[in-house]
Image: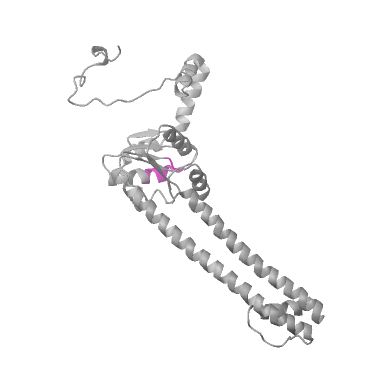
Amino acid sequence: MSFTSFRLRSSGRRSTVRNAVLAVVVAIALGTLAFHRIEHWSLLDSLYATAQTVTTVGFGDVTPKSTQGRVFAIAFMLVGVGVVLYALTATVQSIVQSELVAAFGQRRRTRKMSKLRNHFIICGAGRVGSHLIRDLRLSDAVFIVIERDLQKVAELTDQGVPVLVRDATLEESLREAGVEHASGLAACLADDADNVYVVLTARDLNSKLHIVARAAEEQAEIKLMRAGANRVVAPTIIGGHRMATALMKPAVADFIDSITASQLELAFEQVEVDAASSLAGQKLRDTNIPS
């Protein structure tokens, strides 16, 4: 079951509950008006008698006196109780189905995540994390996002991004995301202390994991490296360097931007050379790669 279909079913259940509540409200309103017109009771007494009828309480202190009133009361008892029973049944059924579907969907997602290998884990889908997710999607990389902000989760779900609604600083969240079998992790949380905790926990769970962490403050860079991050990215520092280049060397900045934005259909790529290859240990100028 996809996240989208789950949300559609949830919307359908909410609609069922709304219809059931609306039916009860309409029944009470009609009963109140009918008793008010037939028995000439006040609106409060009419509402009181209607509530007794639909709830099957029946105190008997307010009862219809006219024949028309009693005939209507008999019909309203049958219809009103039926409406209330329908509303209760629909509500209970919706709650039970919601719990069952949620449990089934969670188990299915857990099984799917447990089969992931050599994937990437993105902790946090904020300003930095959202750009990282976009690039990963463009490269068709296999990844999973850990995010606890429900609004961001809904946005990612609409885009078809696999999301684990958890706290990324918890060890069980990283385990559920398959950190032991992941090839890389990006700590993109807004708070540096949280990123340090994520890096420490992830490094303890997977010593070979390639970890890239975001640093909001410059002094957090050293702490993240000590915690086990392979690379630390400080957006404020990088942004300052890019602005300095754009200010003093605009032609260089334009060239870099044209490459990173794929305007020239050029891109940087990483290729691993096997230890048994004839290229291993050689300098680039001594190989035939440039040709």
Specify start and end residues of the magenta stretch as a single range.
188-197
Work out whether residue 152 or residue 20 is closer to the camera in this orientation and state it.
20
Residue 59, by quadrant, is bottom right
Q: Is residue 185 left or right of residue 277?
A: right
Where is residue 100? Give x, y as percent: 44, 62
Work out whether residue 144 or residue 220 is closer to the camera in this orientation and state it.
144
Question: From where the camera sits, is residue 61 visible?
Answer: yes
Q: Residue at x 55, y 67 (%)?
A: 91
Instruction: Reply above or below: 114 against 232.
Output: below
Work out whether residue 66 or residue 3 is closer to the camera in this orientation and state it.
66
Q: Colour scheme of this structure image?
A: one colour
Where is residue 87? Give x, y as percent: 59, 69
Q: Quadrant of the C terminus?
A: top left
- Helix, strand or loop: magenta stretch: helix
Q: Is residue 192 magenta?
A: yes
Where is residue 286? Give x, y as percent: 23, 12
Q: Is residue 10 left or right of residue 220?
A: right
Where is residue 241? Give x, y as percent: 46, 24
Q: Residue at x 73, y 71 (%)?
A: 29
Q: Residue at x 52, y 68 (%)?
A: 92
Q: Is residue 91 magenta?
A: no
Residue 260, by quadrant, is top left
Instruction: Reply above or below: 281 against 210.
Output: above
Instruction: Reply above or below: 24 against 175.
Output: below
